[in-house]
Image (cartoon, rainbow, N blue to C red):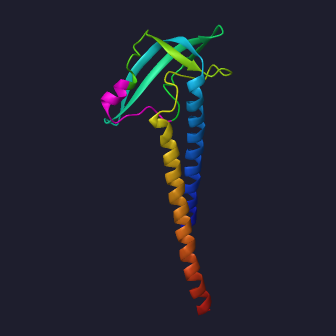
Amino acid sequence: MKQLFCALFVLLGAALLAAGLHGLYHAAASRDWPAVEGVVLDAGLDVRRSHTFLPRVHYRYQVRGQSYESTRLYFSGLPVSSDRKGAEAMLAGLALGRKVAVFHHPARPELAVLQPGITAAARLPLFGGLAFMGFGLLCLYLERRAWRRVRPAAEAGT
């Protein structure tokens, strides 16, 4: 049972790490994406559990005559803050009707961000994934080590 628990930590860590690497790839690539003009349709701050603030934005933009809408501020992780002022800073300049630069993937224009590049939040899933994997692997190692100590004693007693 302990080994299953440890293996679940390793799998969860691997999934977080994979998601983090995927987001980090797009975050890094977005620095070189072309920008078009967009317009903010909605922006605000959602309060979760009275101490977590989630900035939200909804914007529209056009690429090669095709209209798109998105809600992504930046890649990787949720734009969550425990500090109201920090969350409000993420929304600075994103008032309703405001024109903004939208950075979009050249081949997949539906993939867009308002803040290109790697942010601190882009690193969070990587560290979380490594921590979960590390804990799970350490747990498996210690469990195997304990089993090796018990097994010779059990065999000697039979």
Task: Specify the quadrant of the image occupied by residue 8.
Answer: bottom right
Question: What is the count of numbered marks?
Answer: 0
How far across and how far down the image is residue 73, in percent? 48, 25
| Residue 141 visible to the viewer | yes
Query: At x 31% / y 30%, what residue is drawn?
Result: 84
Query: At x 59% / y 11%, what residue is drawn?
Result: 62
How far across and how far down the image is residue 81, in percent? 37, 34
Check if residue 8 falls in the magenta segment: no
In the image, farthest residue toward the right: 107
Taking the image as shown, residue 87 lies to the left or right of residue 74, namely left
How far across and how far down the image is residue 66, in percent? 64, 10
How far across and how far down the image is residue 138, in percent? 52, 63
In the image, farthest residue toward the front: 32
Does residue 75 lie above or below 41 as drawn? below
Task: Specify the quadrant of the image occupied by residue 52.
Answer: top left
Q: In which quarter of the image is the N terminus?
A: bottom right
Span of residues in magenta: 77-89
Residue nearer the viewer, 90 or 1: 90
| Residue 5 visible to the viewer | no
Query: At x 53% / y 17%, what residue is drawn?
Result: 102
In the image, farthest residue toward the bottom: 157
Residue nearer the viewer, 44 or 19: 19
Task: Specify the quadrant of the image occupied by residue 158.
Answer: bottom right
Check if residue 82 falls in the magenta segment: yes
